[in-house]
């Protein structure tokens, strides 16, 4: 496994982005936080500023195995408006490389026709943007090389789904135990 790149645009949802980064790094998966803004520090939708590992133009996409798109507003809109990033999303899709998106961000994949005939989930208000998908209410949904998640409350499930895809079910279960995660049963 090479590396995972998590992309940050101004207005990202911090729990969705940072939970994934945290879980992947705990699983010892090479994970980089990448700014699409041209700035080393990117501010979240709730005013949390985080220092990035790289700028978009510094990423060697040939070494990356997965792209992760966190949700949040206007973070999702900013990601979708970033043409260099969208070119890479398209290239990864065509190459059957992993793409993961959570909350509002699966709408980007829907708009690009990547969810047709696949199971997918998103924040409820964005389900209509999952064009051609079989929409589920799962906290995280894996459909081939596409992983989607519903929202902030599902960030751990989403991160663990990524770990499971990259390292197997045993590793994901072990990590869930280490972080004392038991799915909320209400």
Image (tube, rainbow, N blue to C red):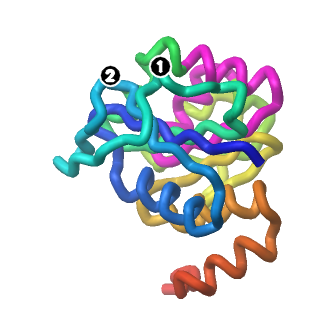
Element on which disc 2 rests: loop
- Residue 34 drawn above or below residue 142: above
- Residue ID at (71%, 19%): 91
- Taking the magenta stretch, the answer to whether it contains residue 100 is yes
- Residue 8: x and y in percent read 39, 37
- Residue 15 drawn above or below residue 133: below
The disc, 1 or 2, on the residue closer to the chain's N-terminal end is: 2
- Residue 145: x and y in percent read 78, 41
- Residue ID at (63%, 58%): 140
Answer yes or no: is residue 142 visible.
yes
The picture quadrant where one finds residue 176 is: bottom right
- Residue 103 drawn above or below residue 37: below
119 or 35: nearer the viewer:
35
Is label 1 in contact with label 2 (beta carbons under 8 Å)?
Answer: yes
- Residue ID at (30%, 44%): 51
Badge number at residue 38: 2
The picture quadrant where one finds residue 109 is: top right
- Residue 85: x and y in percent read 52, 21
In magenta, the rendered stretch is 86-113
Answer yes or no: is residue 127 visible.
no
Mark 2, other Cα within 10 Å: few <14 / some 14–19 / many ≥20: few
29 or 7: nearer the viewer:
29
- Residue 31: x and y in percent read 57, 49
Tell me: 71 left or right of 183: left
Mark 1, other Cα within 10 Å: few <14 / some 14–19 / many ≥20: few
Element on which disc 1 rests: helix
Badge number at residue 57: 1
Q: How many marks?
A: 2
- Taking the magenta stretch, the answer to whether it contains residue 108 is yes
Q: Residue furthest left?
A: 47
- Residue ID at (55%, 19%): 86
């Amino acid at each position: 496994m090479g590396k995972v790149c998590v992309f940050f645009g101004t207005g990202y949802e911090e729990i969705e982005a940072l939970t994934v980064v945290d879980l992947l790094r705990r699983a010892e998966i090479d994970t980089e936080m990448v700014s699409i803004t041209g700035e080393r520090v990117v501010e979240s939708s709730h005013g949390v500023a985080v220092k990035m590992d790289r700028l978009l133009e510094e990423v060697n996409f040939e070494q990356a195995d997965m792209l992760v798109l966190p949700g949040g507003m206007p973070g999702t809109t900013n990601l979708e408006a970033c043409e260099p990033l969208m070119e890479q999303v398209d290239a990864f899709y065509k190459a059957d490389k992993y793409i993961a998106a959570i909350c509002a961000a699966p709408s980007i994949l829907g708009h690009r026709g990547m969810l047709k005939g696949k199971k997918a989930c998103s924040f409820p208000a964005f389900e209509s943007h999952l064009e051609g998908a079989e929409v589920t209410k799962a906290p995280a949904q894996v459909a081939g090389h596409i992983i989607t998640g519903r929202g902030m409350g599902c960030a751990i499930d989403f991160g663990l789904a990524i770990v499971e895809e990259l390292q197997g079910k045993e590793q994901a279960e072990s990590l869930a135990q280490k972080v004392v995660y038991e799915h909320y049963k209400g």
